[in-house]
C-alpha cells in the first residue's frame, strides 16, 4: 500500500526501522491460556450467532491473563473474523480481513491469542463484511477486570444492539431485571454496538461515569437527570449505588432494571442535559507531551463525486481523496502523534482508530479541561473539529475508520501504518472485504 495524499502537517518522513511483517506481530504463541474460548459462527435465518446466541458469550478475563479464542466458521458465507474493539492487541490478532489476516471461510478456523493487559470494557465483532455481519449479530462483550478485583462491586454488562429495528440490552427487547441489593455499588458496562451514537441515562439514582472506552475517568463527579451519549462502538462504565427502590438504565426503548426484587421504578424520559466529556472529571498528567509531537496529521472528512470500486456516486472523502487513494498515515514506533479531525461531510462520523487509545486535546478549538478523555471511538459531528493525540506504541497496519459501518463500506476508511511494517494480506484477495 503506497503512501498517498499529503496528510503530513509536519514531522518529515517517519524513520524506517528493520522490516516487520504483520503476520509476525502476534500475541504469545506459547503458554497455556488462562481463558480459552471457542466461538462457532453460524448463520441462523437472517441472523448470525456465536455459539448459538447473539450477542455471543461474554469473554471475561483478569488483567494479565492469557486469552485464547478459537473462531470456527460453521456457516457464515463470505467468511468471518473477530476484531477486539477497543482492546489494543498486537497487530496480527486485530482481526481485520485483508489487513491482518484472511477471512475465515466456512469450514475454517483461526486462533487469536493476546494478554489481557488493560482492564476495561470492550467488545468483539467480525471485521469481514462488517456492515452486514455486525448488524446481523456477529458480536459479543469482552470484559477485563483489574488484577485487584472489583471488591464488592456488582459487575453488570449492558450490551446495546438493534436487531431488525428493535433495540435490545444483552439481546433482550423491552424491559428486563437484574437483581442487586439496596446499597450495593454497581458497575454497569454499557456497550454501544450500533452504527449511531446512543444516549443512555439512569433513572432513580445519581451516577458517575467511571470509565469511557475502557479507560477510567479521573475523579468522576456524580450526576443526575443527565444522559450519557455513547459513540457508536464506544463504551461507558456507569457507577451507581442501588437505592431501596432500584434504578433503571434507560435507552428510550429497551431498559434494564437493577435493584431488589419488587416493583420496578417508573421510566423517565430522556433528560435534556448530557455529560460533556470535554470538561467532566479532574485533570491529571498525560504520559507524553502533546505540545511537542513528532508527527502531525490532518484527517478531513468530506464528500464528493467520484468512483468507488468503479461505481459512480457521491462518496466520502478523506483529505479530498476517495478510498483506496485516501491517506496512509505513516508513523515510527515511539512517535507522539497529533491529529486534527474535521468533518464537513453533512453527517456525523464515529471515528475508530484500531490498536491505540488517543486522548482528546480540544473540540472546535476549545481545550479539554476535565479528566484525560481517552477514547478509541469518537463521534465527530458535522461541522465539528477535534484535536487528538496518541503515542505510536503498537507496530502494525491499523484501520482508522468510521464505525457507522455502512459509511466504512462506502469508503470512509484510512490506515495508520508504521513505516517498517508490511502485510502479506490484501483487501480483495481470498474474498477479504473488511467492511
Ligand atoms: Cu461515518
Image: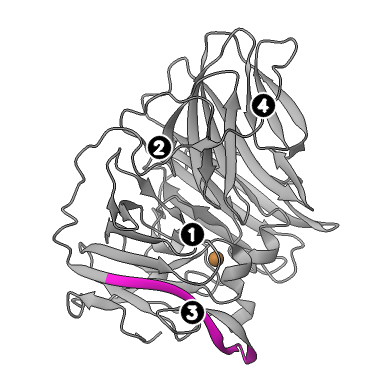
Question: Dot 3, crowdedness within 10 Å: few (<14), some or many (≥20)?
Answer: many
Report if residue 36 lies within the magenta region.
no
x then y, percent, for residue 243 = 57, 11
**SS at badge 1:** loop
Please state which of residues 250 and 12 is positioned toward the viewer in this rendering: 250
Name the residue nearer the viewer: 270 or 163: 270
Label 1 neighbour load within 10 Å: few <14, some 14-19, many 20+: some
- In the picture, the disc for residue 268 is 4
97 with respect to 175 (left or right): left
The mark nearer the N terminus, 1 or 2, is 2
Task: Name the residue located 51 percent from the left edge and 48 percent from the top edge.
Answer: 234
Q: For mark 3, what is the residue?
A: 317
Callout 3–callout 2 Cβ contact below 8 Å:
no
Q: Work out how far the residue at label 1 is from the one at label 2, CA to CA, in angstroms.
A: 29 Å
Q: Residue furthest left?
A: 292
Q: Is residue 282 left or right of residue 196?
A: left
Give coordinates of residue 268: x percent, y percent.
Answer: 67, 26
Local crowd at mark 4 within 10 Å, few (<14), some, or many (≥20)? Answer: some
- Is residue 79 visible to the viewer in this orientation of the structure? yes
Q: Earlier in the sequence, mark 3 or mark 2?
A: 2
**Residue 32 in sight:** no
Residue, disc 1: 381
Q: Residues within 10 Å of mark 2 (few under 14, many from 20)?
A: some
Q: Nearer the viewer, mark 4 or mark 2?
A: 4
Q: In this picture, which residue range is highlighted in magenta?
A: 297-312
Residue 311 belongs to the span the image colors magenta: yes
Amino acid at each position: 500500500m503506497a503512501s498517498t495524499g499529503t496528510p503530513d502537517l509536519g514531522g518529515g518522513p517517519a524513520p524506517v526501522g528493520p522490516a516487520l511483517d504483520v503476520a509476525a506481530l502476534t500475541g504469545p504463541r506459547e503458554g497455556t491460556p488462562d481463558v480459552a474460548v471457542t466461538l462457532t459462527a453460524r448463520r441462523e435465518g437472517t441472523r448470525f450467532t456465536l455459539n448459538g446466541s447473539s450477542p455471543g458469550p461474554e469473554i471475561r478475563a483478569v488483567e494479565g491473563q492469557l486469552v485464547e479464542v478459537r473462531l470456527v466458521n460453521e456457516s457464515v458465507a463470505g467468511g468471518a473474523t473477530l476484531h477486539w474493539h477497543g482492546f489494543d492487541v498486537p497487530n496480527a490478532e486485530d482481526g481485520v480481513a485483508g489487513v491482518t489476516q484472511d477471512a475465515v471461510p466456512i469450514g475454517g478456523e483461526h486462533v487469536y491469542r493476546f494478554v489481557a493487559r488493560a482492564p476495561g470494557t470492550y467488545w468483539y465483532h467480525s471485521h469481514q463484511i462488517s456492515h452486514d455481519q455486525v448488524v446481523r449479530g456477529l458480536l459479543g462483550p469482552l470484559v477485563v477486570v483489574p488484577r485487584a478485583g472489583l471488591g464488592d462491586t456488582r459487575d453488570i454488562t449492558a450490551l446495546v444492539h438493534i436487531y431488525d429495528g428493535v433495540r435490545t440490552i444483552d439481546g433482550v427487547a423491552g424491559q428486563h431485571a437484574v437483581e442487586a441489593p439496596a446499597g450495593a455499588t454497581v458497575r454497569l458496562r454499557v456497550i454501544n454496538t450500533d452504527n449511531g451514537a446512543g444516549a443512555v441515562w439512569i433513572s432513580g439514582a445519581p451516577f458517575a461515569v467511571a470509565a469511557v472506552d475502557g479507560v477510567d475517568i479521573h475523579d468522576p463527579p456524580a450526576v443526575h437527570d443527565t444522559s450519557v451519549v455513547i459513540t457508536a462502538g464506544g463504551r461507558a462504565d456507569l457507577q451507581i449505588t442501588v437505592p431501596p427502590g432500584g434504578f433503571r438504565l434507560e435507552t428510550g426503548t429497551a431498559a434494564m432494571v437493577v435493584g431488589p426484587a419488587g416493583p420496578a421504578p417508573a421510566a423517565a424520559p430522556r433528560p435534556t442535559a448530557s455529560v460533556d466529556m470535554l470538561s467532566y472529571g479532574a485533570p491529571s498528567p498525560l504520559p507524553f507531551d502533546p505540545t511537542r509531537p513528532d508527527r502531525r496529521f490532518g484527517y478531513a472528512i468530506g464528500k464528493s463525486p467520484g468512483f468507488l470500486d468503479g461505481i459512480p456516486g457521491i462518496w466520502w472523502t478523506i483529505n479530498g481523496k476517495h478510498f483506496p487513494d485516501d491517506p496512509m498515515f505513516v508513523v515510527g514506533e515511539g512517535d507522539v502523534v497529533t491529529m486534527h479531525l474535521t468533518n464537513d461531510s453533512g453527517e456525523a462520523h464515529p471515528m475508530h482508530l484500531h490498536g491505540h487509545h488517543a486522548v482528546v486535546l480540544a473540540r472546535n478549538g476549545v481545550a479539554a479541561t476535565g479528566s484525560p478523555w481517552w477514547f478509541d471511538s469518537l463521534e465527530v459531528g458535522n461541522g465539528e473539529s477535534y484535536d487528538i493525540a496518541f503515542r505510536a506504541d503498537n507496530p502494525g497496519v491499523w484501520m482508522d475508520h468510521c464505525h457507522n459501518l455502512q459509511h466504512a463500506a462506502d469508503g470512509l476508511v484510512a490506515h495508520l501504518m508504521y513505516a517498517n511494517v508490511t502485510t502479506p494480506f490484501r483487501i480483495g484477495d481470498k474474498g477479504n472485504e473488511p467492511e
